Image (spheres, rainbow, N blue to C red):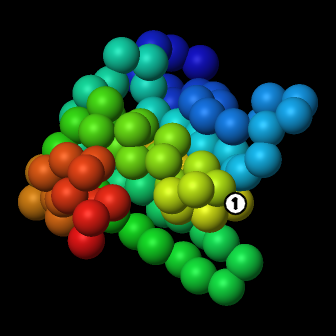
Amino acid sequence: MNDATPARRQIAGAEPFDIGGEAFADVPDGYDGPCRMTCEGAKSRDEAVFPTYAEAAMAATHAVGVSLGGYHTADLTMATAAEVTHRTWLDWLCA
């Protein structure tokens, strides 16, 4: 596997006594370009695209939190700048 190959890694959730879901990133190490966040819940699915990995990671962390998002999983993947739907994680949270 080379440096540009995405490696799925957990970025939030699943601590032994945590309540909530898990968030994963499937982007290359060091990538900070546009990211798509796909969230899955018991009866819902949501998708948003952010201009940077950092914004997407914050959104994913909140998405799997019980008090805010309530999703059981959030996955981050690479996207393009033309696909961006939200400038910040707060824009997504307040939408």
Residue at position x 61%, y 63% in the image:
70
Determine whether 13 is above or below 19 in the image: above
Q: Position of residue 49 (x, y in %)?
A: 28, 57
Q: Quadrant of the N terminus?
A: top right
Determine whether 13 is above or below 76 in the image: above
| Residue reaching furthest to the right | 16
Kind of residue sitting beneath label 1: His
Residue at position x 61%, y 34% in the image:
12
The secondary structure type at the circle numbered 1 is: loop
Instruction: State the residue in front, 86 or 84.
Output: 86
Residue at position x 72%, y 78% in the image:
42
Instruction: State the residue in front, 8 or 14.
Output: 14
Instruction: State the residue in front, 66 or 87.
Output: 66
- The answer to whether one can see residue 68 in this image is yes
Q: Quadrant of the C terminus?
A: bottom left
Determine whether 92 is above or below 46 in the image: above
| Residue reaching furthest to the bottom | 43
Crowding near pointer 1: few (<14 within 10 Å), some, many (20+)? some
Residue at position x 64%, y 56% in the image:
66
> How many labels, in total?
1
**Circle 1 is placed at which residue position?**
72
In the image, taking residue 58 as reference, residue 64 lies left or right, namely right
In the image, taking residue 12 as reference, residue 78 lies left or right, namely left
In the image, taking residue 69 as reference, residue 36 lies left or right, namely left
Q: Position of residue 91 (x, y in %)?
A: 20, 58
Residue 78, by quadrant, is: top left
Residue 11, by quadrant, is: top right
